[in-house]
Image (cartoon, grey):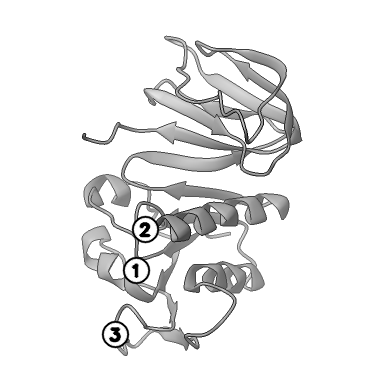
Amino acid sequence: MKRCVIIGGAPVKEYKKTAGYLRSDDYVICCDSGLKHVEGLGVKPDLIVGDFDSYDNPHLPVETIVLPCEKDDTDTVFAVKEALDRGFEEFLLLGAAGGRLDHTLANVSILLDLHSRGKKAVLVDDFSEMEIAGEQWTEISGDYPFFSLLNITGKAAGVTIENAKYPLAGAEITCEYQYGVSNEVLPGKTARVKVEDGELLLIKVKREAAL
């Protein structure tokens, strides 16, 4: 089945690199001001959703769901739910991190929700790729200069990291002590991580932010 790409309104500066994640058969949902990224990413939306409080409804000849401004779900969360109702199993979130911190954290929580449903989901911004690491092995290639594992659920025990500068075996990472930051893949290896009890946010760093 096609992958669903959901495009939000957070900043995207590296359009060329970000567009490299796209596939020709992706199903694209643009959320409100995510429409500002359409030209830069070279995509055409298959569905537009939003309350249009941050971007004018362009009234394109595309299926559009207009949402009320006052609602429990953000436009991005609504888009994810709509995609789930339409049967999608794989998700790529773009323009979903790097703007307002509250929106970024809420969108990271979407990764947790999709992981709990057994769906594959990755959130990409200009600097990193984010996904949830759980009881199945997740690999990190040597293409990434750093990777970090953060506890965002309150429970992460039985953490194992292999083929990395800082390995772990059956460890625990707590929300209060986030010591899984800035690990490195060993030269010529592919690192892998798993969490026997709970989940961790895996952030694979593509490049460091300029100071």
Farthest-out residue, front = 176
The answer to the question of whether label 2 and label 1 lie on touching residues, with beta carbons closer than 8 A, is yes
The amino acid marked with disc number 1 is: Gly
Disc 1 designates what residue?
A: 34
Regarding mark 2 in the picture, which secondary structure is present there?
loop
Q: Quadrant of the C terminus?
A: top left
The vertical placement of 172 against 66, above or below, is above
Q: Identify which residue is drawn at 28% across, 54% down.
A: 12
The vertical placement of 65 against 23, above or below, is below
Q: Is residue 26 visible?
A: no
Q: Earlier in the sequence, mark 1 or mark 3?
A: 1
Q: Identify which residue is drawn at 31% across, 72% down.
A: 35
- Report x, y in % for residue 103: 45, 61
Q: Which mark is residue 69?
A: none
- Report x, y in % for residue 90: 57, 54
Asked whether, in this view, residue 68 is left or right of residue 41, the answer is right
Regarding mark 3 in the picture, which secondary structure is present there?
loop
Q: Which mark is residue 95?
A: 2
Q: Identify which residue is drawn at 38% across, 84% down.
A: 62
Q: Earlier in the sequence, mark 3 or mark 2?
A: 3
Disc 3 designates what residue?
A: 56
- Report x, y in % for residue 154: 70, 41
Q: Quadrant of residue 172?
A: top right
Q: Residues within 10 Å of mark 2 (few under 14, many from 20)?
A: many
Q: Quadrant of residue 55?
A: bottom left
